[in-house]
Image: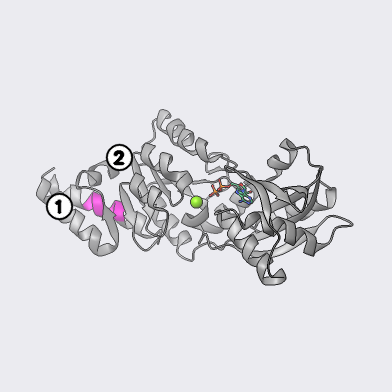
Amino acid sequence: ATPLALMVGTGRGAQMGIIIKGPEVLESTRRIDTVVLDKTGTVTTGEMTLVGTHVAAGEQPEEVLRLGGALEEYSEHPIARAVATGATQRLGELPAVTDFASIEGKGVRGSVEHHAVLVGRSSLMSEHDQEFPDELDQAKTAAEATGNTAVAVAWDGRVRGLFVIADAVKPTSAEAIRQLRQLGLRPILLTGDTTTVARTVAAEVGIEPGEETVIAEVLPEDKVEVIRRLQHQGRAVAMVGDGVNDAAALAQADLGLSMGTGTDVAIEASDLTLVRGDLRVAPEAIRLSRRTLATIK
Ligand code: ADP
Ligand code: MG
């Protein structure tokens, strides 16, 4: 490949809203046959809002919002931002938290008004021996069936309520995935969220919800393992992500694409940055590199 042609390709990328780390990146896109897409912030907007609060029999919604919301005020996670904002809007100032701790990819814990409070995924609740009432289990299933994320709120041994958080699919995601497929690439959805939520979102953007195409409930540190496993199967993998959690996977992938709207850590770990956070630029980038390389040959 002549450096000049690659430089021209890089320049065109900039016009399209793609920042390319270096001309050599265009070469590595040629072999790509699989595209792993992070769900939150990549396929979805990542702008989450609290759309509902369910409570267990005998519990008050205000109390669940107050204690759960107080804890989430201390977390930077998009789910936490949505819960804290919703709780503050409804209740005003929330109580103070002591002994706050964040549990990566699972949730948060801390003391609020002498209660040991937990907010997070179901596995966190069972790991801390919090009883999960049936009515909340049903509410969780119903919320997830619509693609919403449900997180549990527990204190003193029992799950007291459930926050339902909505995160809309970006209007451009389905079209982007259709184009990736047209280029002969196999899309895979990857997320720390539950299988039910992941499959609903997958169906919405045209990824068939199978075991190989939707990889859910993956802990942040295991995302890189998913990429390695696919590479061991002989696949050449592009990864598209936005979060701090995605950085190792972006670096491991044969081609890492970050969202310009994402975190600096993800942008630094990637080869290409999609400036506007529009997923349709991913197939554009692959088309550009193929064209650039074709003119070189
Ligand atoms: P993703 O891979 O989709 O970006 P994360 O790995 O950040 O997701 O989180 C995985 C899951 O852990 C979330 O879907 C949620 O159930 C739970 N979780 C993580 N942090 C928090 C928090 N601060 N509050 C509530 N739940 C959380
Ligand atoms: Mg993300």
Mark linked to residue 142: none
Picture quarter with the C terminus: top left
Residue at position x 19%, y 51% in the image: 292
Which disc is residue 31 wearing? 2
Residue nearer the viewer, 75 or 195: 75
Q: Which mark is residue 7?
A: 1
Within 8 Å: ligand 2 and the Cβ of disc 1?
no
Is residue 140 among what the camera can see?
yes
| Image coords of residue 94 (percent x, y) | 69, 63
Residue drawn at x 11%, y 46% is 3
Q: Residue furthest top?
A: 232
- Of the residues shown, which amino acid type is indicated by label 2? Arg
Q: Amino acid at mark 1?
A: Met
Work out whether residue 157 or residue 41 is closer to the camera in this orientation and state it: 157
* Residue nearest the viewer, comparing 39 with 128: 128
Which residues, given as a range, are shown in magenta? 285-291
Mark 1, residues whose alpha carbon is within 10 Å: few (<14), some, or many (≥20)?
Answer: some
Residue at (13% x, 42% y) in the render: 1
What's the distance in space between the residues labelled 1 and 2, CA to CA?
Answer: 19 Å
User: SS of the residue at dot 2?
Assistant: loop
Mark with earlier residue (1, 2): 1
Please give left or right for residue 86 compared with residue 42 in the image.
right
- Image point (56%, 63%), residue name: 168
State how the image is colored: one colour
